[in-house]
Image (cartoon, helix red, strand yellow):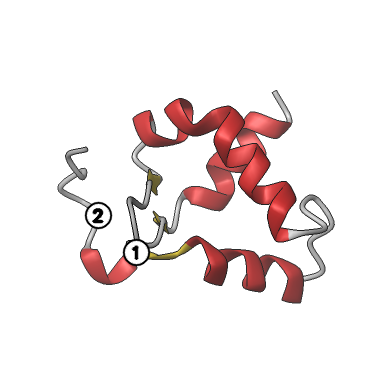
Amino acid sequence: MKLNQGVKLNHLRPIQDWYEFHKEQGGKVFPTFASLQWFVRQHRDSLVDAEVLIPGKGSRRTLVTAEFGPKVYEILFK
């Protein structure tokens, strides 16, 4: 995957951190981390094509950009 030139590496964060922030903000869309993982599995190609998800491989963690949340909600509410 080639990252968009506007995406800086320091703007990437592990998907687990995104989920924790989602929970702290009262997010009810994904009641468990497993539900978020299921959503990502179902929409992986769209999220990767939108350049908001960098799937982990092996021991490397899955990373997301700052635009991950808005893209998730766009997919959910289509």
Q: CA distance from mark 2 to mark 1?
A: 8 Å
Residue displayed at 54% across by 40% down: 71
Q: Secondary structure at mark 1?
A: loop
Q: Which mark is residue 12?
A: 1
Q: How many other residues sit within 10 Å of disc 2, few (<14), some (14-19) or many (≥20)?
A: some
Q: Provide residue 52's location: percent of width, then percent of height.
A: 40, 45
Residue displayed at 55% across by 67% down: 16
Q: Provide residue 25's location: percent of width, then percent of height.
A: 75, 72
Tell which of 42 and 26 is nearer to you.
42
Q: Which mark is residue 55?
A: none
Contact between marks 2 and 1 (CB within 8 A): the answer is: yes
| Residue at which label 2 appears | 7
Q: Earlier in the sequence, mark 2 or mark 1?
A: 2
Q: How many other residues sit within 10 Å of disc 1, few (<14), some (14-19) or many (≥20)?
A: some
Q: Secondary structure at mark 2?
A: loop
Please identify, in this view, whether the residue under mark 2 or under mark 1 is nearer the observer. Answer: 1
Tell which of 48 and 69 is nearer to you.
48
